C-alpha cells in the first residue's frame, strides 16, 4: 500500500490531516530539520507522536540538516530524545545522524533525504546498508529514472508529488544581513505567507518565495509540482510513499491537497480505470485555492529542464 506522507503545521493540524487521510507525518524543529512546514519543539514533538500513534499512523522526525562541529552535542541529545519518544523513522542527510543513531540500544530506522544528491540506486543501497529503510529521491529526476531506481533499490522509495521545491540555499542569513546593513529591521521568517516576500524575474514573469530560518536563506521554485493526474505510473511501479510538501502553504491548502491525493490513491487501488476517469477532476479543488502567481507543473517528470 502506497503511503501518503504530509507535512503538518501544528499538533492540532495533525488531527485534521488524519481525518483527511494522511498515513504519515514529517515533524521536527528547524534547528535540525530543513524547510519544515511547521515548527515542533520537544513538547510538541512528544504530543504529536502520541497523537499520531494513537491513530496507528507514522511519525517521521526531520533531522536532515548539514551539521557543523558545534552542532554535534545538541544533535546527539536530540537523537536520544527521538529514541525516548519513539518516532517511527528519522530523516537524515548528514552521516553524523547515522553515527549517533547507531550508538542507541535499539536504533530507529532511517530515511535518507539529501535533497539533490539522491539520484541513483547505488546511493540508495549504500545508505540502506548503513541503516536507511527509505530514500527520498531528488526532485530533479525524470519518471524513467525514478522507475529505474525503484526496480534496483533495496530500500523504500519516496517521491514528492506536490508542493514547491528549494532552488537555492545559503547557510548565511543573506536577507537579514542585507537589511541590517541598511539599518533596517526586517525579520524574514519561514512562518510568513509565501506571497509576502518574492524575488521577481521580469523576463520570465516568475516569482520566487524567499524565507530565512535557523538553517539560512532559502529561495523556492516559482511553480508548484502537481502530479495528481500523473500518479498511475508511480503507483503501478510500486513507489512506496508519495509526499505532499506544505512548506509556506496554509493549513487549508495542505488539507485540500491531502484529501484529493487520498482520493486519487484510493481510486487507483480500487481500480486503475476509475482513477483514470476521475483524475482530471481531482485537481479542481486544489486549483480553486492555488495562488495566481504559482502555476502548476510536473517538475522534471517528463523533461530535463524546467524554465
Image (cartoon, rainbow, N blue to C red):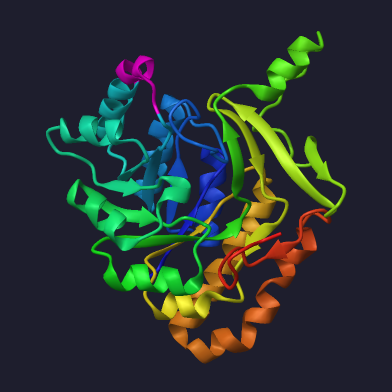
Closer to us: 151 or 91: 151
Image quarter for residue 199? top right
State the image coordinates of residue 148 (x, y, percent, origin top left).
37, 73
Q: Quadrant of the N terminus?
A: bottom left
Q: Residue extending furthest right?
A: 202
Q: Which residues are magenta?
A: 67-74
In front: 228, or 259?
228
Q: Quadrant of residue 78?
A: top left
Q: Residue furthest top?
A: 183
263, above or below 85, in the image: below
Instruction: Give percent across and percent down for residue 249.
Output: 67, 46
Q: Is residue 85 visible?
A: no
Instruction: Reply yes or no: does residue 165 show up in magenta.
Output: no
Q: Residue at x 61, y 68 (%)?
A: 260
Residue 26 visible? The answer is yes
Q: 237 or 289: nearer the eye?
A: 237
Q: On the picture, is 129 further left or further right than 224?
A: left
Question: Please, is residue 36 above or below residue 272 in the view?
Answer: above
Q: Which residue sits at x=75%, y=65%? A: 287
Residue 299 in percent (x, y) is at 61, 63
Task: Give the dominant element type of the magenta stretch: helix, strand or loop.
Answer: helix
Identity of the residue furthest to the bottom in this view: 273
Number of numbered discs: 0
Amino acid at each position: 500500500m502506497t503511503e501518503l506522507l504530509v507535512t503538518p503545521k501544528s499538533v492540532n493540524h495533525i488531527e485534521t490531516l488524519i481525518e483527511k487521510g494522511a498515513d504519515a507525518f514529517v515533524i521536527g524543529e528547524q534547528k535540525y530539520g530543513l524547510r519544515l512546514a511547521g515548527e515542533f519543539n520537544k513538547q510538541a514533538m512528544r504530543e504529536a507522536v502520541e497523537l499520531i500513534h494513537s491513530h496507528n499512523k507514522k511519525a517521521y522526525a526531520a533531522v536532515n540538516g548539514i551539521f557543523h562541529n558545534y552542532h554535534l552535542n545538541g544533535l546527539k541529545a536530540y537523537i536520544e530524545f527521538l529514541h525516548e519518544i519513539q518516532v517511527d523513522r528519522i530523516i537524515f542527510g548528514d552521516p553524523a545522524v547515522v553515527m549517533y543513531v547507531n550508538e542507541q540500544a535499539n536504533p530507529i530506522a532511517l530515511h535518507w533525504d539529501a535533497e539533490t544528491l539522491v539520484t541513483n540506486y547505488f546511493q540508495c543501497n549504500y545508505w540502506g546498508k548503513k541503516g536507511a529503510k527509505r530514500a527520498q529521491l531528488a526532485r530533479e529526476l525524470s519518471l524513467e529514472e525514478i522507475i529505474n531506481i525503484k526496480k534496483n533499490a533495496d530500500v523504500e522509495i519516496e517521491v514528492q508529488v506536490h508542493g514547491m521545491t528549494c532552488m537555492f540555499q545559503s547557510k548565511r542569513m543573506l536577507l537579514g544581513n542585507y537589511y541590517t546593513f541598511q539599518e533596517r529591521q526586517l525579520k524574514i521568517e519561514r512562518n510568513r505567507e509565501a506571497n509576502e516576500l518574492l524575488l521577481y524575474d521580469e523576463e520570465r514573469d516568475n516569482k520566487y518565495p524567499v524565507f530565512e530560518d535557523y538553517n539560512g536563506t532559502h529561495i523556492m521554485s516559482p511553480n508548484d509540482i502537481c502530479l495528481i493526474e500523473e500518479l498511475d505510473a508511480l503507483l503501478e511501479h510500486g513507489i512506496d510513499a508519495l509526499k505532499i510538501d506544505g512548506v509556506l502553504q496554509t493549513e487549508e491548502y495542505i488539507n485540500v491537497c491531502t484529501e484529493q491525493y487520498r482520493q486519487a490513491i484510493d481510486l487507483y487501488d480500487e481500480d486503475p480505470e476509475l482513477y483514470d476517469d476521475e483524475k482530471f477532476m481531482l485537481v479542481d479543488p486544489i486549483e480553486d485555492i492555488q495562488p495566481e502567481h504559482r502555476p502548476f507543473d510536473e517538475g522534471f517528470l517528463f523533461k530535463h529542464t524546467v524554465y
